[in-house]
Image: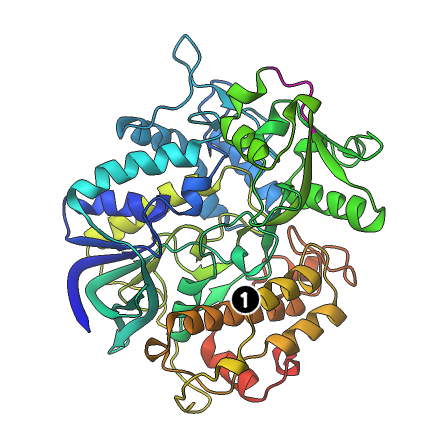
Amino acid sequence: MKHKEADVLIIGGGIAGLMAAEYLSSHKNVIVITKFSAEKSNSFLAQGGISAAIDEEDSWAEHFLDTLKAGRHHNDQEAVKQLVKEGESVVRTLTEWGVNFDRHENGSFILGKEGGHNRNRIVHAGGDQTGKKVIEALIRRVSKNVKIVTHHYAVDLIIQDHKCIGVSCKDDENQTTIFQAKNTILAGGGYAGIYGTTSNAFGSDGSVLCMAYRAGVELSDLEFVQFHPTLLSDRVPAGLITEAVRGQGGILINSSGVPFMKDIHPLKDLAPRDIVSRRLFQEIHEHGEKVFLDISSIKDFRSKFPGVTMLCENAGIDLDKGLIPVSPGAHFTMGGIVTDQSGKTSLRGLYAVGECANTGVHGANRLASNSLLEGAVFAKKVTNSILSSEITDMKPATFKRKKNLEHKSIQIDGLLQESEIHLLMDKYAGIVRSKKELMRVAKTLNLPSWRPDLIKEPLPVIKRFNMQTIAWLTVTSCLKREESRGSHYRKDFPSQKKEWDSKKIIRSLWHDESIIAEKTVAGIFN
């Protein structure tokens, strides 16, 4: 067993983790740990851009209102203000760090429009390759002063005297390494990878959320999973067709050539993602239609969208016909580890940032192109908190356990296969949900009544245990919220309810243990 030490550990190599590493590197000894190579992250794959109110006729206040509207006012308004006010600063910083954003001949930014935005305010780099350009620039900078440890899967947090002092990891050869640090930042992404039809290609199994959960840290809003309307149909993993294509004039049509969004929402094809995804779901599953993105009106499509062009050509789609077959799939998760606005969790020494965190900025449904912005903005806030050496913490986690659970080795037959979890989540906990279907899948996903010592298990078992854990937490959170709001739609509770305004479903191991031990879902309603 190897041991390594640092001032700060960062779990995850997307925009949030790498920007935090860059900010900290001139002051602290930093180690970044990634599951794969540093280039394999959902940030790297991001085709959308960074939303920023930089046009003279735009304002952060308008961006603020668009964000709240998309999030169905489930957002933390103060966190949203901090997010949208920093847009221009983020673009300026990344430009200084080597990201060449797309510009007009006069030097001004080319601003695109995406779903839920009432103005053109999306900055792109390389057309639909913004994530790639940003992450490549960050890796060039970070690798000069920061050690990036690749192909290491973070298994569990190391806790001493109610403080996080590091992380235990396993590499691809199943060897264990203990990383110790004064501060640990979780930046390992979300959990949309528990669905079979998803845009998430690299390890989005919710592992960092599970680590925090097992340490007694609170999670929240897990029922809010955003389904992107336009994933390339019949492809695993599903390739993403960026919303910017619709921003340039792409129109959603059915098999008969009928554009079906024009009477659904004032923004038509650029309505918020939850609305568009449910409409596509209806066309496909209720009307038996195939759905296409009509790109025939977009001039110079290949040069504007080189990434989408390559994706379609690899799938054998003839773009000259002007139609791309699409269907919705799991894309982004609004739920995550509860933090304050500086990224602190309820466990001393532990921070969370990016998609794995729940700061409240996205509410019940993320506004398009706010994700890279969130990672950048809150990476800086986490950095400032660590460098200021504040002694104050969030309200500490309550470590009162219902009972002592025995450590046992996991019986491999007691866990579902990844493919089984994918199928269950797609079929019973997808875009349209109901109590009957959610109860069925929750019982199937129910966890053992004991807690394993995961670091002793082989890596494939650890991954399956994490996937089943976060899938169970997601499904049971869906059961608890008896209304429809944003990305969470219950056909048995189809309307948004006032009594659920500002109400969050908080998940904590110390509360859920008794439910798990009873081997029943009924306890979740107590």
Which residue is at 57% across, 31% downward?
A: 313
Q: On the picture, is 434 further left or further right than 42?
A: right
Q: Which quadrant of the figure contains the C terminus?
A: bottom right
Q: On the picture, is 402 further left or further right than 195?
A: left
- Residue 420 locus on image (x, y percent): 61, 68
Is residue 71 in view? yes
- Residue 157 found in image quarter: bottom left
SS for dot 1: helix
Between 176 and 334, the one nearer to me in the picture: 176
Residue with the mark numbered 1: 418
Colour scheme of this structure image? rainbow
Is residue 267 in view? no
- Residue 181 locus on image (x, y percent): 19, 64
Which residue is at 42% across, 36% downward?
A: 131
Query: Is the stretch drawn in magenta largely helix, strand or loop?
Result: loop
Q: On the picture, is 183 further left or further right than 65?
A: left
